């Protein structure tokens, strides 16, 4: 016959094991149900670029501005298009906010970051004074300012 303390410890261990098993089962069930909900999501195309409003937006992420609109960049490596910054309007229409001309950068690939000051910041892969890329700021009114022109060497190049 077992002493009372061993029986008590055994019952407590069984209770803890059952509680752990119940918690794991609940977590697994929650995971299974949420995977089922994720599979039900659909993708909808908001806008297809046609070249006049930019080309090759594939390597950036869109950013939501304080006005609720989506902002982003296109690389635009063909023709006279050196890249654009665009803004989504209601209904999925896109308006070009800025066209890069080479002196302010070309081929922006990183998208835009909305900062606390309300301005957007980004980089252009090439262009600028030495054609090694730029760091820029875009105001909500669409005014672009080059903050830094990359030169290679110690300041790096091609951001």
Image (cartoon, grey):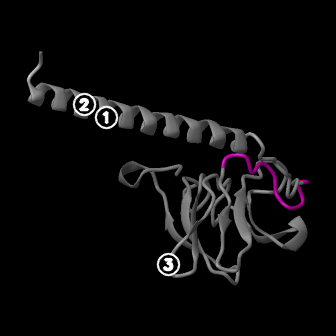
Give me the C-alpha separation between circle 1 and circle 3.
52 Å
Give me the C-alpha separation between circle 1 and circle 2.
6 Å
Q: Is residue 78 left or right of residue 151?
A: right
Instruction: Count neighbours of disc 2 (C-alpha within 10 A) and say few if under 14, some if 14 to 19, many if 20 or more.
Output: few
Whether residue 145 is visible here, answered yes or no, is: no
* Dot 2 or dot 3, earlier in sequence: 2
- Residue farthest top in this picture: 1
Q: Looking at this view, is 66 or 21 the one in front?
A: 21
- Residue farthest bottom in this picture: 141
Q: At which x and y percent is residue 67?
A: 70, 80
* Up-down relation of residue 135 to residue 49 (above or below): below
**At numbered mark 3, what does the secondary structure look like: helix, strand or loop?**
loop
* Up-down relation of residue 117 to residue 26 (above or below): below
Residue 53 among those drawn in magenta: yes
Say which residue appears at 11% left-offset and 19% top-offset: 2
Q: Are marks 2 and 3 in contact (CB under 8 Å)?
A: no
**At numbered mark 1, what does the secondary structure look like: helix, strand or loop?**
helix
Q: Is residue 6 left or right of residue 123?
A: left
Tell us which disc is closer to us: 1 or 3.
1
Q: Main secondary structure of the magenta part?
A: loop
Residue tagged 2 = 11
Give the magenta part as a residue range: 50-59
**Mark sitting on residue 116:** 3
**Mark sitting on residue 15:** 1
């Amino acid at each position: 016959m077992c002493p009372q303390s061993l029986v008590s410890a055994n019952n407590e261990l069984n209770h803890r094991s059952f509680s752990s098993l119940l918690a794991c089962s609940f977590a697994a069930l929650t995971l299974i149900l949420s995977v089922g909900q994720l599979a039900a999501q659909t993708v909808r195309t908001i806008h297809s670029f046609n070249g006049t409003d930019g080309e090759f937006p594939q390597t950036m992420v869109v950013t939501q501005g304080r006005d609720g609109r989506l902002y982003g960049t296109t690389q635009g490596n063909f023709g006279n298009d050196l890249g654009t910054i665009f803004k989504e309007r209601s209904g999925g229409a896109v308006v070009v906010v800025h066209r890069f001309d080479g002196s302010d950068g070309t081929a922006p690939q990183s998208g835009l970051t909305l900062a606390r000051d309300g301005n957007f910041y980004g980089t252009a892969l090439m262009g600028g004074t030495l054609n090694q890329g730029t760091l820029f700021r875009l105001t909500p009114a669409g005014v672009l300012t080059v903050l830094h022109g990359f030169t290679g060497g110690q300041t790096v190049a091609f951001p």
